[in-house]
């Protein structure tokens, strides 16, 4: 498995300018952001992290609910679109950060005291889910919350390009096992949204998107 092909920055760089024009994507981001906000701790996160922020469709919606939000992505063009939005809307509490989570040596430099970590539609792009979750928990403070949205196990036809290396969604029970093996507790799933779209074979299909929340235990 080549991790370079999984983290296809060129693919996302080339899509960045048109990313927000897709109405299905915007509706998904809206629903996921609402679900993430609903699952935030009572106290406003002081130091939040979003991985795979893209152009910031979710980022800009959750930013007002965080004191500070670091928005990470491996595509510089996606981050450039986010930076433009931040500048245009004078959003002061979001810091875009270029980082490839499939490269442990890059992730190692991240802060280790995020009290809230979230993401939408990115986990399926990261090759080794188990290793990634083990890395991620090391960057969360004890008692911190994780909230990840992604596709439920799908038919393998969700992505238009058959050559794109992705996980075909996640089986909830299997992902729960991976989260618990990484050290997370209180794992809970809900359905955040259902994407209705024509799949790669041209058939209109429903693709549910879960939000899984979990805690890093205090001790
Ligand atoms: C499907 S997009 C979702 C973007 C955004 N969350 C949204 O909802 O519009 C996946 C994002 O994850 C980023 N990504 C993929 N692999 C990554 C990795 N290994 N490390 C960091 N970001 C990654 C891509 O560049 C892309 O912006």
Image (cartoon, helix red, strand yellow):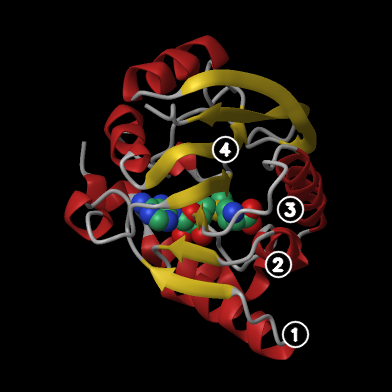
Residues under numbered marks 1 and 2 in contact, where contact means CB atoms less than 8 Å apart: yes
| Rendered image: mark on residue 60 | 2
Of the numbered discs 2 and 4, the one sitting upstream in the chain is: 2
x and y, in percent, of residue 129 in the image: 35, 31
x and y, in percent, of residue 167 in the image: 44, 31
Residue 163 in sight:
no
Q: Is residue 70 above or below residue 32?
A: below
Q: Residues within 10 Å of mark 1 (few under 14, many from 20)?
A: few
Q: Is mark 2 within 8 Å of ligand 1?
A: no
Residue under the image location 62 percent in, 19 percent down: 188
Of the numbered discs 4 and 1, the one sitting upstream in the chain is: 1
Q: Is mark 3 within 8 Å of ligand 1?
A: yes
Tag 4 residue: 148
x and y, in percent, of residue 151 in the image: 61, 31
Residue under the image location 69 percent in, 48 percent down: 43
Q: Residues within 10 Å of mark 3 (few under 14, many from 20)?
A: some
Tag 1 residue: 89
Is 19 on the left-hand or right-hand side of 103?
right
Residues under numbered marks 2 and 3 in contact, where contact means CB atoms less than 8 Å apart: no
Residue 145 in sight:
yes
Q: Nearer the viewer, mark 3 or mark 4?
A: 4
Of the numbered discs 2 and 3, the one sitting upstream in the chain is: 3
Tag 3 residue: 25
Q: Quadrant of the C terminus?
A: top left
Q: Within the image, what quadrant is residue 196 found in?
A: top right
Q: Nearer the viewer, mark 3 or mark 1?
A: 1
Q: Quadrant of the N terminus?
A: top left
Is 8 on the left-hand or right-hand side of 193?
left
């Amino acid at each position: 498995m080549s991790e370079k092909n999984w983290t296809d920055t060129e693919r996302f760089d080339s899509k960045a300018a048109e990313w927000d024009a897709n109405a299905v994507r915007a509706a998904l981001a809206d629903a996921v952001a609402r679900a993430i906000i609903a699952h935030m701790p009572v106290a406003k996160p002081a130091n939040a992290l979003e991985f795979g922020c893209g152009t910031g469709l979710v980022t800009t919606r959750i930013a007002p609910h965080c004191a500070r939000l670091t928005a990470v992505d491996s595509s510089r063009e996606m981050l450039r679109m986010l930076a433009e939005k931040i500048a245009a809307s004078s959003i002061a509490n979001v810091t875009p950060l270029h980082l490839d989570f499939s490269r442990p040596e890059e992730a190692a430099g991240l802060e280790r005291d995020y009290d809230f970590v979230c993401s939408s539609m990115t986990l399926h792009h990261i090759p080794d889910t188990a290793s990634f979750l083990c890395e991620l928990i090391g960057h969360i403070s004890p008692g911190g919350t994780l909230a990840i949205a992604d596709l439920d196990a799908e038919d393998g036809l969700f992505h238009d390009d058959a050559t794109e290396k992705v996980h075909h969604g996640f089986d909830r029970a299997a992902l729960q096992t991976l989260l618990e093996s990484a050290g997370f507790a209180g794992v809970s799933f809900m359905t955040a949204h259902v994407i209705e779209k024509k799949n790669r074979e041209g058939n209109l299909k429903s693709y549910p998107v879960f939000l899984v929340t979990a805690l890093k235990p205090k001790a």
